[in-house]
Amino acid sequence: MTDSNNDNNSSPAPAWHTLTAEQVVAHWQSRAAEGLNPTEVESRREQHGRNEIPEKARRGLGKIVLTQFSDLMILILLGAAVISGIVGDVEDTIAILVIVVLNAVIGAVQEYRAQRALAALRMMAAPEAKITRGGQVQVIEAWELVPGDIVLLEAGMVVPADLRLLEVSELQADEAILTGESVTVEKQPGALGEVSLPPGEKTNLAFKGTQVTRGRGRAIVVATGLETELGRIATLLHEEGSSKTPLQQRLARFGSRLSLFVLAICALIFVAGLLRDEPLVLMFLTAVSLAVAAIPEALPAVVTISLAFGARKMSHLKALIRHLPSVETLGSVTVICSDKTGTLTENRMHLERFFLEGSVLEDISAANGKSPAQQRLWQALALSNDVEAGDGKEPIGEPTELALFKAARDAGFDKNVLRQSLPRVAELPFDADRKRMTTVHRSGDAFLAFTKGAPERMLPHCTRVMTAEGLKEIDRDALLAQANAMAREGFRVLAIACREWPQLPPEQNVDTLENELVFLALAALIDPPRKEAYDAVKECRTAGIIPMMITGDHPATASAIAVRLGIADAQDEVITGKELEGMSAETLAQRLEHIRVFARVSPSQKILIVQALQKKGDFVAMTGDGVNDAPALKHADIGVAMGLKGTDVAREAADMVLLDDNFATIVAAVREGRRIYDNIRKFIKDTMSSNSGEIWTLFLAPFLGLPVPLLPIHILWINLVTDGLPGLAFTAEQAEWGAMSRSPRPPGESIFAHGMWQHIVWCGLFVGGITIASQAWSIARGIEYWQTITFTVLTISQLFHSMAVRSERESIFVLGLLSNPYMLGAVLLTVALQMMVIYVPAFNPIFKTQPLPLFDLGVCFALSSLILFAVEIEKWLIRKGWLYQAG
């Protein structure tokens, strides 16, 4: 540490964060009026740099766009586009390229938005600062500040750097951007206290980006730029990157395996055809066409549309999706780490109970004002506050006073009415030392004082207690024990007292107004849980999701709310930020099994909690609203910011923004995420089963002594009509029954789990079997249009399959054809298109088809429908528990 008495233009600034208040005052007492000289300013700016948060170099637009084409599935689709062009199918080539470009644009936009998080943080810096330099007060741009500068603070100013307070006068600051708590912080000069304390408890420091709401002060700059609390958060934002969503990981694995499988099958069919002396060109085109058909190029479109529709639906549920893949990721969430204030609670203080006249009243309406003590109590709550309560306007004031005022008004004690008979004539404002406030009111020819404050600071000044039987001697120990018991339940407890004088004392000070008080009551307040939060927490548990509370609030309050909501049991421990500081990552990971509530945590500790959860295999959603939450929001698998009380930094770092700041909205979004993932799975199941049917048909027919059953144009047509419209119709499918009664899918789980690959194999064989059977039956009859029959059976059977797999468990006959009108419309339109290529003469030469007699067309539909009944039998076996468990 630099000697504080030898600071000059050649010495660096002292390590102000580590100095005691006495050292700071001693060093600057003689210089506070003058401030730094120009030489000192330049020296310190050279050492510490500009007082700003530097912006990380952003990737150029070209690099961002190119990155979007690095995914294996995208490369496979580009290869499919090239192959389609070789075959001559220009329409497929254009369609694939449009899909790929659309995905690239969406990805580039998402990355651009993510880069704005740090920009929003930089904008929070104060543009100007009022300082003392060279003996004169001057206003400079905030970036010019250096450690050691003397800053003058006034109400309404944004704090320009981290400051150590030297002098204050009723100074209060709003630090919600750092703490997430809406209650303003009383500031005072004094010892620093524990470095591990969160910003809201460092009452002798003012932090960059926070706002002075009241009073004035003089302070010394102790940190600038990245060394400030805000700067450290910016550093964390730089360090934390984002990872791929579960769906992106599963599709990447799916794409890599599919490409190898398709290449192998196409090569095998090509060789098998040549061994049967089929024309080389025909077999090459057939193999290439099958490769195009086997790759589900509609998958990115289906995924994108599913996510977009899901995002739109979530916006109606008050959840704004900023990162599109996050829509599905919600369905994989295993832990939701939620803030308390405003998310699980209503973000308003509420008077919930009294200790009055010797007993606890949990129903405050029972204090009906009939006894003298009750009368005085309600008068005190109505009058002894600074709430602005204009006629016809919503009252405005500090949250605790507002709760007391509203409770009195609801009990029939209106401030506007009472102050006509009990006008205020004097007051002693609240301060952090006394932790009390007093107002004095004229009552006829006498005077009446009301005092409220912290019980431990109030009770020593009370000599009697007002009861239903009159005034009695006070038992301070019993009342303090009662107050502590209420505090352990999570309440904020205030003591209320009064005193009467026939004449007002000549000097209205603490000694004359706040002694020999008559105790009235203990008032217990709490920010109550949201009514819908209890059901949402219960649904989380049913869905296998662990809700956790991570808050900056007091441990007792956090525990009380957690117990009320069912997040934790009364015996569960609460871990504080101080305890986390000395805990190893291994110990934290072990204890996470039994911890549900964290209190008084810092920004870096929130990230440690998220990392520990992720390390043990959890998929984490994290909520937050302040700047301090932004790094954890970015690091979590799903960052959820508050839309009503959240900061721009938090919203920019998040994947989802809650427009109503409600925990229940997160749970509704999880339900929607599961629906979307299920529907994407249904599409993959449908299209891969259909594609495997085509592969088995082409692969087995030659080995059974039959000619190649389909032409390349047939394969491409089937791929177009059966994967297109029906595939998109899956995006509108309703949620599976019991979607929120099953455990979350493990992030590493294969997309083919829960019987999907078995379904694809047997359905492909079944469709291939009935298609080859129709081919053999037609050839045996000696009809020349056998290929049209084969072509039609394969096409229509895939449409029946699409209808059958709308649900993984429920029968189509229970769901009803009209429960998804889009699917019904897609199937009917596809059937009409198939009939067009069969019966419209202009299309016959193009598709090499011939019109079918009515009988043969009926046989085609009858054979094709068999797949629907086969799938219905499979689902019946699943419901009975006799077959693999569907997801």
Image (spheres, grey):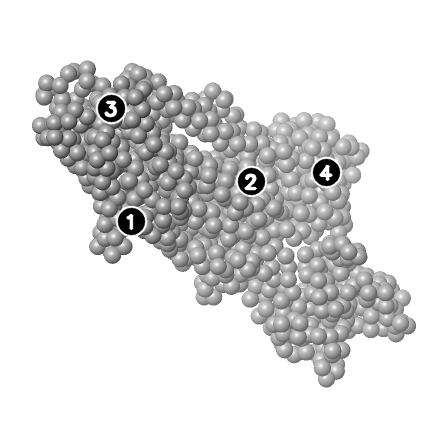
Q: Quadrant of the rendered structure where residue 595 is?
A: bottom left
Residue indicated by mark 2: 651
Position of the N terminus by quadrant:
top right
Q: Nearer the viewer, mark 3 or mark 1?
A: 3
Q: Are marks 2 and 1 in contact (CB under 8 Å)?
A: no
Q: Nearer the viewer, mark 3 or mark 2?
A: 3
Residue indicated by mark 1: 886
Kindly tell me whether residue 13 is visible in this rendering: no
* Mark 1 element type: loop
Q: Are marks 4 and 2 in contact (CB under 8 Å)?
A: no
Rounded to the nearest angstrom, the CA distance separating label 2 from label 1 is 37 Å
Q: Earlier in the sequence, mark 4 or mark 1?
A: 4
Q: Amino acid at mark 4?
A: Ile
**Mark 4 residue crowding within 10 angstroms, few (<14) / some (14–19) / many (20+):** many
The label on residue 150 is 4
Q: Amino acid at mark 2?
A: Arg
Q: Earlier in the sequence, mark 3 or mark 2?
A: 2
Nearest the eye: 173 or 276: 276
Q: Quadrant of the rendered structure where residue 518 is?
A: bottom right
* Mark 2 element type: helix
Q: Which residue lies at the image location 38% right of the left edge and 31% below the top edge?
A: 300
Q: Are marks 3 and 1 in contact (CB under 8 Å)?
A: no
Residue indicated by mark 3: 849
Q: Earlier in the sequence, mark 2 or mark 1?
A: 2
As drawn, 568 above or below 125: below
